[in-house]
Amino acid sequence: MKTVEEKYQRLLSILKEMDSVAVGYSGGVDSTFLAKIAADVLGGNALSVAAISDSFPQHEREEAEKFARNLGLNYITIDTSELDNPDYRKNDPNRCFYCKQELVRRLRAVADEHGVKEIALGTNLDDLGDYRPGQAAAKEGGARFPMVEAEMTKDDIRHLSKQLGIPTWDKPSFACLASRFPYGEEISKEKLERVGQAESVLRELGFRQFRVRSHDNIARIEVLPNEMAKVILLREDITRLIRKAGFAYVAMDLLGYRTGSMNETLHQIRPAVADTKSNT
């Protein structure tokens, strides 16, 4: 088994071989690490490209820009319009495929415009174990996963980020706002904004790792188990403010925060999942 240092050295070699790269950058743990290391290895030949869309909340946009500025990244933004695609809006289990397809298409265009050879995403080895149809779209579009090639896990990336002084080393995990909806519930700009506002309530009340899952007019809150008592303590404020965002009811999930909780119902829509898995 490779050590973290061996994996890191492998990543440096991969990036050096790329010669130039446009990194899909969101300000999260993985993409920030990759963008910073690419900048260290390739200098001005590394672009950090943030895709701005309705599923990327304002708070995350501002934080991504702050990190890019502080780390000295060659940072640019592009607008993506996945909501224009009816296949994306209908939110079947292939949704992430269409989103990543749009992202990679735009990344490739930006790379070509700047004379950049490769495009890369911050996918890590742990990501391969979950249901992620977007990875198939990324591969089809010619994107590379340098940290998968270097066999890096999420823990490796957090460890190295801390060691190298990258501020996202302990940042909570984040996924686009579209992941807050059950498969089959159509996504709209208004619904994304409503979820974003509801999550801002929890952030401003001091919760660190959380999700607000949208089930029609019900907001299902996921927090870490050790913060459930805090939800109960603040239940009146949380309910009032999340209702103000547009939900009628507010509930807490007793299993607490976990990534990919909407995938727990995939067995109920098996045909659509089977079609997607044939592409991966």
Image (cartoon, grey):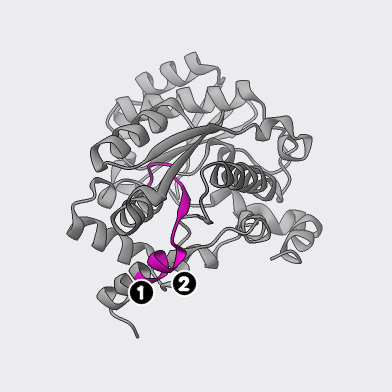
Q: Name the residue under label 1.
A: 10
For the point 56% across and 41% down, which residue is it?
A: 113
Where does residue 202 sit, x and y in percent of width and height?
36, 29
Q: Which amino acid does label 1 sit on?
A: Arg
For the point 45% across and 39% down, which residue is it?
A: 211
Q: What stretch is highlighted in magenta?
A: 13-28
Q: Quadrant of the N terminus?
A: bottom left
Question: Does residue 85 appear left or right of residue 252 in this picture?
Answer: right
Q: Mark 2 Cα within 10 Å, few/some/many (few <14, many 20+)?
A: some
Question: Does residue 180 appear left or right of residue 241 in this picture?
Answer: right
Q: In this view, does 15 lie above or below 234?
A: below
Q: Name the residue under label 2.
A: 149
Question: In the current view of this chain or complex, which residue is farthest to the bottom?
Answer: 1
The question of residue 14 being in magenta is answered with yes
For the point 34% across and 30% down, which residue is it?
A: 203
Q: Is residue 125 visible?
A: no
The question of residue 134 being in magenta is answered with no
**Mark 1 or 2, nearer chain start:** 1
Q: What residue type is labelled 2?
A: Glu
Where does residue 193 sit, x and y in percent of width and height?
54, 23
Where does residue 100 sit, x and y in percent of width and height?
62, 48
Which residue is at the front of the view, 80 or 221? 80
